[in-house]
Image (cartoon, rainbow, N blue to C red):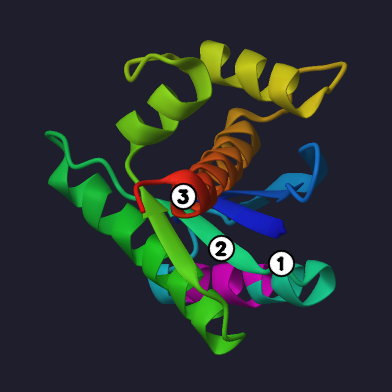
C-alpha cells in the first residue's frame, strides 16, 4: 500500500509518500513551492501539473489529504481549499481514491495529542518512519503525517472487519 499524503497550500504544498505494506517507510517527500507573486490561477495550474507528475512517477494506490482548518482567517481557509481541490483533481484524474483527515485527527493519530505542535509531529513522524533526521521542511513532515494517519486508520479498519463482532 503506497500512500500519497498531501498538506495543501497555494504557496507551499507538502507531499509525502509512505509505503505501508509491512513496516512503514518513507519513499519520498518534499514541498511544491510556487511564488505568492504569481497569479492564483497560474499557481493552481503549476501545483496541479507538479502533483500530477509526482503521482505518475510514484503510482500511489490511495491519496490522503488534510482538510483545511477554518479558523479566524477565512481568506486563508479558502486558499487552502483551492489547493485541496487541486490535489483531489490530480488524484481523481488518475482514478485514485481520496481520503480526508482533519488536522486534529492527524495530530491525535501521530502523537496521541490533538493539539501537538509542528516540532512534536516532525519528531513522531521521524520515529514512526525510522528516519535518522527530522523530515524537513515542516510541510513535508505534515504530508508524511497525513499518509501515516491514513495507513494506521486503514489497518484499524481492516482489523475491525476481520475481528469485529460477527
Q: Which residue is mark 2?
A: 63
Q: Are marks 3 and 1 in contact (CB under 8 Å)?
A: no
Q: Are marks 2 and 3 in contact (CB under 8 Å)?
A: no
Cα separation, mark 2 vs mark 1, equals 7 Å
Q: Residue at x 55, y 88 (%)?
A: 93
Residue stretch in magenta:
42-51
Mark count:
3
Query: Residue 13, percent across and down?
Result: 55, 51
Q: Is residue 97 left or right of residue 21?
A: left
Specify the label residue 18 is tagged with. none
Specify the label residue 157 is tagged with. 3
Element on which disc 1 rests:
loop
Does the segment drawn in magenta span residue 44? yes
Q: Are there few (<14), some (14-19), or many (20+) residues within 10 Å of tag 1?
A: many
Query: Residue 135, percent across and down?
Result: 73, 27
Element on which disc 3 rests:
helix
Q: Are marks 2 and 1 in contact (CB under 8 Å)?
A: yes
Q: Residue at x 51, y 56 (%)?
A: 64
Element on which disc 2 rests:
strand
Q: Which residue is mark 1?
A: 60
Relative vertical location of residue 129 with respect to residue 78 in this rendering, above or below: above
Occupied quadrant, residue 103? top left
Q: Is residue 145 left or right of residue 105?
A: right
Chief secondary structure of the magenta portion: helix
Amino acid at each position: 500500500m503506497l500512500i500519497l499524503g498531501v498538506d495543501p497550500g497555494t504557496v507551499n504544498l507538502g507531499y509525502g509518500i509512505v509505503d505501508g505494506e509491512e513496516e512503514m517507510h518513507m519513499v519520498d517527500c518534499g514541498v511544491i513551492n510556487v511564488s505568492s507573486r504569481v497569479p492564483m490561477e497560474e499557481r493552481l495550474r503549476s501545483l496541479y501539473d507538479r502533483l500530477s507528475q509526482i503521482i505518475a512517477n510514484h503510482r500511489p494506490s490511495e491519496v490522503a489529504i488534510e482538510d483545511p482548518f477554518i479558523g479566524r482567517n477565512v481568506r486563508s481557509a479558502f486558499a487552502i481549499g483551492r489547493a485541496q481541490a487541486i490535489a483531489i483533481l490530480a488524484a481523481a484524474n488518475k482514478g485514485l481514491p481520496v481520503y480526508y483527515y482533519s488536522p486534529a485527527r492527524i495530530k491525535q493519530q501521530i502523537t496521541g495529542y490533538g493539539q501537538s505542535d509542528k516540532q512534536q509531529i516532525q519528531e513522531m513522524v521521524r520515529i514512526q518512519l525510522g528516519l535518522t533526521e527530522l523530515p524537513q521542511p515542516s510541510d513535508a513532515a505534515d504530508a508524511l503525517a497525513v499518509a501515516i494517519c491514513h495507513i494506521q486508520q486503514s489497518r484499524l479498519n481492516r482489523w475491525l472487519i476481520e475481528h469485529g463482532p460477527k
